[in-house]
Image: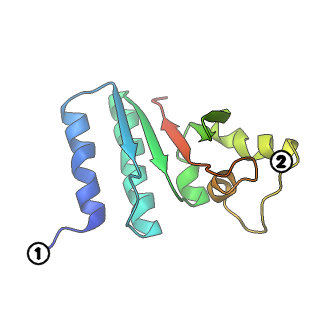
Amino acid sequence: SEVSDAERRRVPICEALAGRIALSCWDDLCQGVDSASALEVVRELRLAVDLSGMTTVVKLSQGSDALFGLFDKVCVLGEGRMFYFGPAANARKYFMSLGFRPLPRQSTFDFLVSGEWTTFPPAACILTAS
């Protein structure tokens, strides 16, 4: 049988756990998988971080509020500048305090990466062990 994209994404997570690494970085970990699979992969990564104590940096291009809520911190970068670094739970409120407004029903992550403050707004999300 074929291996799904979501299953294929789990292998490096297991390798990171087996290698007992302190820091892992993932570039578009959820690219090419549906939103349910992306949430499942990030939940598993969250569990791996909590069990191992490692720190993980994940660059994402999209994400639901449920997925975004799994991250401890977020770093919004663009055009060679850092626009925000801090608790993920405070990021939306921070940009709104600067006068930026999300679209109706827009997820926090989509709001952050589609911001008016930059023309190239990728974001990195960080998981740290509690």
Circle 1: element type: loop
Q: Which residue is drawn at 51% across and 56% down?
A: 61
Q: Name the residue under label 1.
A: 1
Quadrant of the rendered structure where residue 73 is? Answer: top right
As drawn, the label of residue 96 is 2
Q: Which colour scheme is used?
A: rainbow
Mark 1 vs mark 2, CA separation in Å = 48 Å
State the image quarter where residue 86 is shown.
top right
* Helix, strand or loop for disc 2: helix
Q: Count the labels in the image.
A: 2
Q: Looking at the image, is mark 1 or mark 2 earlier in the sequence?
A: 1
- Picture residue at 27% right of the left edge, 27% below the top: 21
Residue positioned most to the bottom: 1
Q: In this view, does 11 lie above or below 38?
A: above
- Could you tell me residue 106's position as x and y percent? 71, 64
Q: Marks 1 and 2: which is nearer the front?
A: 2
Amino acid marked by disc 2? Met
Residue 80 is left or right of residue 18, and the answer is: right
Residue 29: mark = none
Which residue sits at x=34%, y=34%? 24
Residue 59 placement (x, y as % from top left): 47, 46
